[in-house]
Each structure stands twice: as structure tokens, then as C-alpha cells.
């Protein structure tokens, strides 16, 4: 409201100047008067952008009325047109006949525009932080803090953004710059010191002393079981197989002779052997055949058992032994 009153006063001053000053040769008094009335109306209604346009039109019509240039700058300022307002303020300051009282008013206005730019950059920096773009955030916080020395918290936010962006050296320097401020003007020094400590290299005195490694007694790994029983079974099975085969072949010769001796003659009688002798010989031959089969079966069982012992693996064994940097775990299957 105060700004509106000041601007309105400037407009009134403009009207007074128009009334007092003689119109330039190129100015049309009626046109100028109509523009002044329209500009005042738009300004009072809060239509500052439109008022700025009308004040500039008046300035084009009559360069003698320099106060309207200030009015245009002030209206653009209130409309939020930061760049346009600054250009118009500086154009007024460059006039050779600029009014000293108005010039004094312009300096704080320019500072306000600088503050608005800084606030906009701070807002953009905060948005960059939310998206994880900490490098951009650090740059924006730096620009904003440079324009607003009265915002030390922005220096700390720049340091933190540099920290999170991975720029260790720049972050350390920024933390130190912030910590060097007056503590009464930098309330976040506790956070700054804590965050700086995360980056600062630690001295040997601050590093924990490693404990001596615990002594681990070695465990002897058991030797794998002997394969001799397997080999013995295989060897015994082979001997049994050979013995059974030899016995069977030898018995076959006796069987052939027995069958020859028990062939009946022309009279239908067996001449070589009596009935009891034939039965006794048959029983002996059958026993030898059964024995050869038994030896063959035993050899097969021995072969299977020996092969299984050779193919089987002993149970896993684990041993732990100390080394220069810890312990060694040895596993045997």
C-alpha cells in the first residue's frame, strides 16, 4: 500500500510538471493529457504493466517530462518486470537533468530488484536440489548468496550442495568461509562443522587403533582313507574269477570222460563203472561245477565292492589356520 501511495504521488507530480512546463514542439497537449489520465487510471487500478506502457508512450510524446520515465520504471517494477524496470531506472539516472530527489529514490529500488533476482535464483536452487542436480544448485546458491550478503544461510546451502555434488575441495572452502562468519549471524555453524568433518581428512591420532588378531589354532586335516582295501577286493575278485574259470574248464574234461564211461554197450549195460561208482562221480563233478560258479559269483561281488570303494569320496574335511592378515579356511572333499 505504501508503494502504491509513493507511485501515486509520483504520478501527481507528473501531472504538476505537465501543467507547469511548456509543451515541446512535437508534443500534442491533448494527446499527452489523455495519456496522463489513462496512465493514472491504470496505475490506481493496479494494472501496473499497462500503466508502464502508457507512461512510456508519454515519454515518447514529450521528452521534456522526464518524471514520466521514472513513473514508467516504477510501474514496471510493481508489475514484476524486473529487467524492464532496471533498464528504465538506469535510463533515468543517465539523464543529464535527472532530479536529485528521484535519483535518491531509485537506488533502493535497484537494490530491491537485485534482491528479487537473488530470491528467484534461490528458489531455482531449491528446486534443483529436489531433483538431485546438486552441481546446478551450488551454482545458483552461490549467485544468490553473492547478491544477498544478508542471507548467510544461502552460503551454507551452497557448501552443502557442493558437498553432495562430490566437489570436496570447493565444499571444504565453502564450509570454512561460512564458519568464519560471526556466529551470531550464522546460526547453522553446528551443521556446517559436522558436515565439514565428514570431508576433512582425519589425523592418525583420531583413527582407531586396530586390535590384535585373535589366535586361531590350526586344525589338522585328516588324511583320506587308504585305497588298499579296494585294491585287495579287486585283486581277490580277479583271483576268484580265474580260479573259478580254471575249475570249471577242468571239470568239463572230467564230465566228458564221465559221459564216455557211462555210455551203455551193445548189450545195454555200462561196462566201465558200477551204479554206485557212477553216482559218486556225478556228485563229485556237480560239486566242482557248483564251486566254480560260487567262485565266479564271489569274484563279481568283490569287483563291485572294490569299484565302489575306488569311486566313493571321503567326507568333507575343514581346517582353519592363521595367516599374516587373518585366517585361512581349508576345505577338502
Image (spheres, helix red, strand yellow):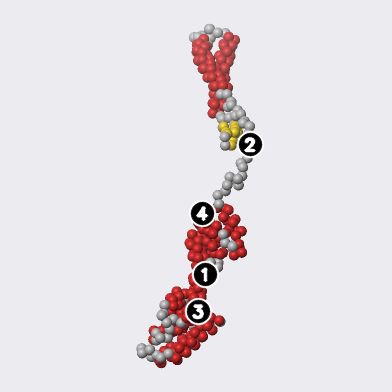
Horizontal side of residue 39 vs 198, given as left or right: left
Q: Quadrant of the N terminus?
A: bottom right
Q: CA distance from mark 1 to mark 4?
A: 26 Å
Please tell me which residue lies in front, 110 or 103: 103
Please tell me which residue lies in front, 153 or 43: 153
Give residue 47's mark: none
- Report which residue position mark 3 lands on: 105
Q: CA distance from mark 1 to mark 2?
A: 60 Å
Q: Position of residue 155 (x, y in %)?
A: 54, 62
- Report which residue position mark 1 lands on: 119
- Report which residue position mark 4 lands on: 168
Residue 189 drawn above or below residue 86: above
* Whether label 2 touches label 3, CB < 8 Å: no
Observer-side mark, 1 or 3, equals 3
* Whether label 1 touches label 2, CB < 8 Å: no
Q: CA distance from mark 4 to mark 3?
A: 44 Å
Residue 290, by quadrant, is top right
Q: Position of residue 139 (x, y in %)?
A: 48, 62
Say whether disc 4 or disc 2 marks the residue closer to the N-terminus: 4
Residue 231, by quadrant, is top right
**Res. 300 visible in picture:** no
* Whether label 4 touches label 2, CB < 8 Å: no
Observer-side mark, 4 or 3, equals 3
Q: Position of residue 202 (x, y in %)?
A: 57, 48
Say whether disc 1 or disc 2 marks the residue closer to the N-terminus: 1
Amino acid at each position: 500500500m505504501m508503494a502504491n501511495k509513493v507511485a501515486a504521488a509520483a504520478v501527481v507530480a507528473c501531472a504538476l510538471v505537465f501543467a507547469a512546463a511548456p509543451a515541446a514542439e512535437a508534443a500534442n497537449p491533448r494527446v499527452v493529457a489523455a495519456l496522463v489520465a489513462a496512465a493514472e487510471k491504470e496505475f490506481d487500478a493496479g494494472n501496473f504493466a499497462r500503466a508502464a506502457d502508457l507512461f512510456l508512450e508519454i515519454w515518447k510524446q514529450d521528452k521534456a517530462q522526464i518524471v514520466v520515465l521514472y513513473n514508467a520504471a516504477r510501474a514496471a517494477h510493481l508489475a514484476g518486470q524486473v529487467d524492464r524496470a532496471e533498464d528504465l531506472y538506469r535510463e533515468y539516472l543517465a539523464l543529464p537533468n535527472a532530479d536529485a530527489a528521484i535519483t535518491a529514490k531509485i537506488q533502493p529500488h535497484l537494490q530491491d530488484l537485485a534482491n528479487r533476482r537473488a530470491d528467484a535464483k534461490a528458489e531455482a536452487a531449491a528446486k534443483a536440489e529436489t531433483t538431485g542436480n546438486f552441481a546446478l544448485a551450488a551454482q545458483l546458491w552461490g549467485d544468490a548468496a553473492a547478491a544477498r550478503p544478508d542471507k548467510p544461510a544461502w552460503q551454507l546451502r551452497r557448501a552443502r550442495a557442493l558437498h553432495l555434488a562430490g566437489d570436496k575441495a570447493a565444499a571444504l572452502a565453502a564450509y570454512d568461509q561460512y564458519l568464519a562468519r560471526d556466529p551470531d549471524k550464522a546460526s547453522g555453524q553446528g551443521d556446517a562443522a559436522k558436515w565439514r568433518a565428514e570431508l576433512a581428512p582425519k589425523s592418525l591420532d583420531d583413527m582407531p587403533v586396530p586390535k590384535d588378531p585373535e589366535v586361531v589354532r590350526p586344525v589338522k586335516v585328516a588324511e583320506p582313507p587308504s585305497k588298499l582295501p579296494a585294491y585287495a577286493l579287486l585283486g581277490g575278485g580277479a583271483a576268484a574269477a580265474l580260479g573259478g574259470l580254471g575249475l570249471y574248464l577242468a571239470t568239463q574234461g572230467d564230465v566228458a570222460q564221465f559221459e564216455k564211461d557211462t555210455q551203455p554197450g551193445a548189450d545195454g549195460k555200462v561196462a566201465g563203472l558200477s551204479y554206485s561208482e557212477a553216482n559218486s562221480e556225478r556228485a563229485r563233478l556237480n560239486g566242482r561245477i557248483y564251486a566254480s560258479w560260487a567262485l565266479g559269483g564271489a569274484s563279481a561281488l568283490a569287483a563291485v565292492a572294490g569299484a565302489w570303494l575306488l569311486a566313493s569320496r571321503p567326507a568333507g574335511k575343514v581346517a582353519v589356520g592363521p595367516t599374516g592378515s587373518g585366517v585361512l579356511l581349508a576345505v577338502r572333499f
